[in-house]
Image (spheres, rainbow, N blue to C red):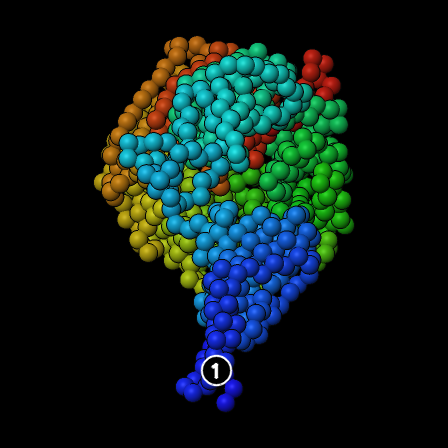
Amino acid sequence: MATQSTALLGLALPITGELDGTWGDTVNDSITSLLDSAIAGTTTLSADADVTLSTTALAADQARQAIILWTASGTVTRNITAPASSKTYIVINSTGSTQSIVIRGAGPTTGVTIPAGGKAVVAWNGSDFVKIVSNPTVLTTDVTGTLPVANGGTGLATTPTNGQIDIGNGIGFTRTTLTAGSNVTITNAAGSITIASIGGGGTTASGSVVLTSASVTAQAITTTTYGQTVTLPDATTVSKGGILYNISNLGAYPLEIINNAGSTLGFVYSNCPVTVGLADNSTAAGTWSFVGAEPYAVVAQNVSADLKPFTEEPFHRVVVIDTNRTLFLLAGTTLSGIIYNASTKLWGSVTLIRNTNNYDQVVGILSATNQVLVSSSINTAMEAVVLTLSDTTITVGTAATATLSNNATACQTAENLVAVGSSFVVTTAFTSITALQMRAMTISGTTVTIGAATTLNGTNTGSIDANVYVAAVSSSVVLVLTNTSASTFFATPYTISGTTITLGTGATYATTNAEQYKVRPISSGVRWAVVITSSAGTTVGMIISVAGTTATISTVTLATGGGTTNAGVIVSGSKLIYIGGDAVATNILTDTAGTASAGTQIGPLYATTTVVNPISANATTNLAIFYGYTSSVSTVSRVAINFTGSSPIVSDFDVQAIGASGLPDGFSAVTAFNYQQTYDTQILSGATSYAWDLTTGAPGSRAVAVGENCFYSFAPKLVPIGPSATIWNSIAPNKVVCYDTTYGSSSVFGALQIVKSIS
């Protein structure tokens, strides 16, 4: 029987009785010599090619050797394939070039890569060769775990972010970033840390400027037109401090200061530097502090002879198109329109809409994207037309017409143009008859269709400062509030389908000597709160609900002793806070699922004729702020009402007075809100619960800042154009447009001026 061999190294396995007289050769050649090579032998591979190690049982071969020495000089990685069986190799890559080699098992397996100049001990693990030890050590593949401090490491396992450094903490290291001190900025980048001082340095610029955390302190900015801005940096990138920037305006136009969120924080007037500090940097917008900033300024102005013919200022209207664009409807010798784009700071051209004058009604509404519906009436001639808008360009469609039953009257409190689904409704009052009418309109493309007139409940009366209020209840129902000669109040739903109007089931309330109805949406707009003020009797509060096409009224007595048109109201949630303006009490009207209730009245807070205007109602602090004006003694006041409970509590009452009776007014005369307004054109209100009373140009007039936490007067740097605030129109609570058709020393120009306040 032939001599057998071992499975792994191929050594001889003589059996009993075999090799009689010849065993010495077999032991020497097939056991001893082969063991010698398996333990200390070397296979040298000098050819630059992949190689499969030879395997020969009972005889010398390549695969049995202990050491594999690679001496070829190539650049391509070469594979050395060994038997896929248990074996340990010392692999030495002595290439004369950059060549790597891979020792792998037959199959082939993945194996182990040894770079040029590298050495490794590899062993078969049952499925592949794996590295036991290597020289040099490849950190990315040969080292795992965390190297402790005692062994020269950091003891940290996390990957550092930009700017992180390791700082000793007594027992090891803490991986952290540097913290900026006062007037210092730190910018962490990949592989670098930049530390800069913001307590010095200066620069000049023109136009709009965006500051960063690396901006120098002194900023001299030259404005080149209205509406330019300086944007403060992301507050989270800046350290808090009292003097971070000093901003000077070297131009002729006010410079608006805005934060990272785009909110207006104040204005820098020409040659009136403003110092900027940062009180809180927990948000990107931050809480900034200012010294020298003005609360309002002109942000756009258009002076042109083309604007002079529009002398019917009470019929000027504003339609907000989008975030940047506003359409101004101007009435005079014609009805025309002009658009201002706040983004590009450009005005469009004055565009003719209707070529006639002596308007009794002008209303406009955004009817679709880049589309405005305008309705106007002169005597019995009603027109409705679609304006198609492209940036600041106006294209006027073909007007639809209707003949009114009588001459329309110039009654702004009877003017409504409201969208109801895909239809629109417009209301009209008349001169020679007491009827009030409503029509529905539809738009197809740019074509308007005007429906037939529906006579409303109630009558047109000049004795009440609120005639018609229209609100969309749903996509097909409107609620109309009207009255008759101070004796009956009507709440009537109507269904609108195309140009067809269908009467619903209304509700009424009998009144006595009513002077004004103040209407405000309440409870997130699902119902309506109404306050009926009267010169005799009582002040009544109502909650109006609409279910389907049926209206209901719930009433309650708010205050005894009646009231006047000077009262102030404001809504917060399900509560309406009411302050009587003329020796009348103060109270709260609460809506509870459509049921009206009143608290316990207090006051009166005012003993003389006072116009009361609401400023803000804070649902967090439960404080409502009102601003009162008494013309006879040049006095203004601020009242804070706590409305936490169902009854009002006076939290604060402040008064400022200038001059005496008979002297020029020290404060501007603020008008009372009518029933349709939610803010006064003469008071600019910001989201931070502050408001600024714009002075109207009387000698010595002072403006007033009034809010939840402030009340002071100041000499304003700006007196808006226009002889009276009655011809101003609101664009937003903190933005107003003023008109003047006699602008310039020779009155040869007309002017539009947009004034904006802190938001």
Instruction: Give how far across and how far down residue 607 sits, in percent.
Output: 30, 25
User: In this picture, is 56 found above or below 357?
Assistant: below
User: In this picture, is 625 found above or below 460?
Assistant: above
Can you see residue 494?
no
Please give the name of the residue rendered at 73% of the width and 24% of the height, measured from the top-left corner. 304
Observer-nearest residue: 693 or 286? 286
Please give the name of the residue rendered at 45% of the width and 57% of the height, measured from the top-left corner. 132
Please give the name of the residue rendered at 39% of the width and 19% of the height, measured from the top-left corner. 712
User: In this picture, is 695 found above or below 648?
Assistant: above
User: In this picture, is 41 found above or below 241?
Assistant: below
Determine whether, in the image, residue 121 is placed left or right of residue 706: right
Circle 1: residue type: Gly
Q: Residue furthest front?
A: 21
Disc 1 crowd, CA 10 A, few/some/many (<14, 14-19, 20+) = few
Mark 1, residue position = 21
- Label 1: element kind: loop
Observer-nearest residue: 88 or 697? 88
Determine whether, in the image, residue 440 is placed left or right of residue 308: left
Observer-nearest residue: 125 or 368? 125
Can you see residue 45?
yes
Instruction: Give how far across and how far down residue 292 sits, in percent.
Output: 48, 15
Instruction: Give how far across and how far down residue 261 sits, in percent.
Output: 51, 35
Instruction: Give how far across and how far down residue 542 sits, in percent.
Output: 35, 48
